[in-house]
Amino acid sequence: MRMKSSIEQAVYVLLLLMRVPKNSFLTSESISERLNVSPTYFKKLMRVLVQAGLVRSTPGAKGGFSIAKAPGEITLYSIFRAVEGHATIYQGSQLFKSVFNLDDSEATEPCVLQTIMDEIENKWSELMKGYTLENIMDRVKSLYNLDEVDTWINNQINKLDNSII
């Protein structure tokens, strides 16, 4: 299985927004530049995160984006579902009926492969629900010095504040 790069980008956007002081914002342009992604594509990602209730969008000259929930409430699973949607990962096509030459009256049990894949997806989902943005940030902070990131965030906020004057 391969996840979209949007999930990685969404996680790092949220990690950045966690570092933004209360009542401050980062602009779409500054975040997309930091992530080195197209501003047009990035706006689509932000719209998804806003619709999912993970990010707050504040309009206006001093507006931008901020985190909408406590980091301990945002799970990796909720980010995944915001980006990927709610469809199941595996969708069987009832091939087992053809392979085993079964008609509908004989195929009374669910497809074994579908059942196994559902079990795997449930376990995988539970694992993802066990990791919050707060857990992820704790790991990041234990491995890296975040002074440069915090300085960058403060510079972005100051640019926004000074551009209004």
Image (cartoon, rainbow, N blue to C red):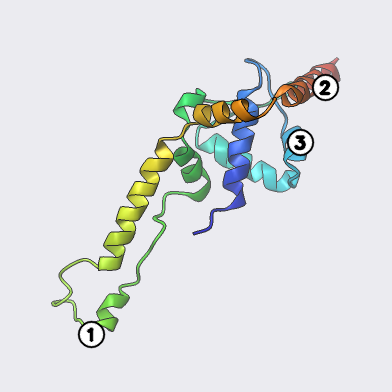
Asked which quadrant contains residue 88, the reply is: bottom left
* Of the pair 88 and 61, the residue shown nearer to us: 88
Relative image position of residue 66 (x, y in whole percent): 62, 25
Dot 2 amino acid type: Lys
- The answer for how far apart the CA atoms under marks 2 and 3 are is 12 Å
Q: Residue at x 62, y 39 (%)?
A: 46
Which mark is on residue 44?
A: none
Q: Which residue is mark 3?
A: 29
Name the residue rendered at 46%, 45% in the picture: 81
Q: In the image, which disc is placed on residue 159?
A: 2
Q: Is any part of residue 100 visible from this angle?
A: yes
Looking at the rendered structure, the kind of residue marked 1 is: Asn
Q: Residues within 10 Å of mark 1 (few under 14, many from 20)?
A: few
Quadrant housing residue 58:
top right
Residue shown at the point (39%, 45%) measured from the top left: 125
- Whichever of labels 2 and 1 marks the residue nearer the N terminus, that label is 1
Residue 1: image location, x then y, percent: 49, 59
Residues at badges 2 and 3 in contact (C-beta under 8 Å)?
Answer: no
Tag on residue 101? 1
Tally the marks.
Answer: 3
